[in-house]
Image (tube, rainbow, N blue to C red):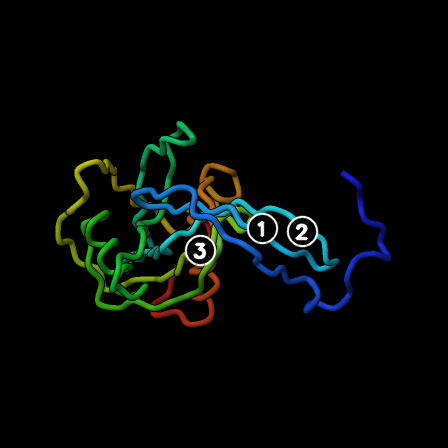
Amino acid sequence: MKKKKMQDQPSDESKLFEETITSSHVFDGTLLQVYVDEVKLPDGSTSTRDWIKHPGASAVVPVFEDGTIMLLKQFRYPAQKLFIEVPAGKIDPGETPLTTARRELEEESGLSCKNLEKVGSLYPAIGYADEEIFVYVGWGLQETGKQTDHDEFLINYRIPFSKALQMIEDGEIKDGKTISAITQTYLWWKRNEPFPINFKC
């Protein structure tokens, strides 16, 4: 593939946008919709973009008053690995991200929360999907009992917030949304501090 010279690169951000010429819906899945689009590039040439339409998702970092957080252990088939994750799930039709966050927290971890605040969001796969994950922190937690889907198997993993940060640094937590959610929550908590947490290991 021919590479562009530095002087050929656009300097105006508005000239970076790509225009859709045609869009073909090539796969209709239970969760994902796959499209193949022909696009007009900033220099006037055309190219193909394969991309996935996703309904979006919400993730929650549940924080207990003793400074621990509830994570989950789950096997992920595509990667063939066991991952440590925050409670999270897709937004169902008619739901707001906040509603999804409350539902997923209760279904996956068996916890409800009195307080739930948005701390940020992220796009986990910008090269091939439009998914946006909305990140929340929850506190004032109560146990309610899990209500997982029939094909969903999870183990609760409660650890100090400080240990979760260390596990990110050590590469033990590898899930992108979990790394981002814990980091965004940590930064939010340092600014707002609903109650004190010792973040030092």
For label 3, count other residues whose C-alpha is less than 10 Å away and answer few (under 14), some (14-19) or many (20+).
some
Quadrant assignment, res 192: bottom left
Foreground label between 2 and 3: 2
28 or 111: nearer the eye? 28
Q: Amino acid at mark 3?
A: Phe
Residue 199 place in picture, x, y as percent: 44, 55
Q: Which residue is mark 3?
A: 199
Q: Secondary structure at mark 3?
A: loop
Q: Which residue does the image show at 75% across and 58% down from the upper left?
A: 43
Instruction: In the rendered view, tell whether residue 58 sits above or below residue 174.
Output: below
- Tell me what residue is drawn at x 58 percent, y 50 percent: 38
- How would you rate the neighbour count of disc 2 (Cα within 10 Å): few for under 14, some for 14-19, many for 20 or more? some
Q: Is residue 108 above or below residue 83?
A: below
Labels 1 and 3: the sequence-earlier one: 1
Q: Is residue 108 left or right of residue 86?
A: left
Q: Residue at x 22, y 57 (%)?
A: 103
**First in residue order: circle 2 vs circle 3:** 2
Name which of mark 1 and mark 2 comes first in the sequence: 1
Q: CA distance from mark 1 to mark 2?
A: 7 Å
Residues at discs 1 and 2 in contact (Cβ within 8 Å) = yes
Q: Contact (CB < 8 A) between labels 2 and 3?
A: no
Q: Secondary structure at mark 1?
A: strand
What amino acid is found at the position of numbered circle 1 in the picture? Glu
Report the Cα–Cα distance between label 1 and label 3.
Answer: 49 Å
Quadrant in the picture for residue 7:
bottom right
Residue at 39% across / 47% down in the picture? Answer: 33
Q: Which mark is residue 38?
A: 1
Residue designated by label 2: 46
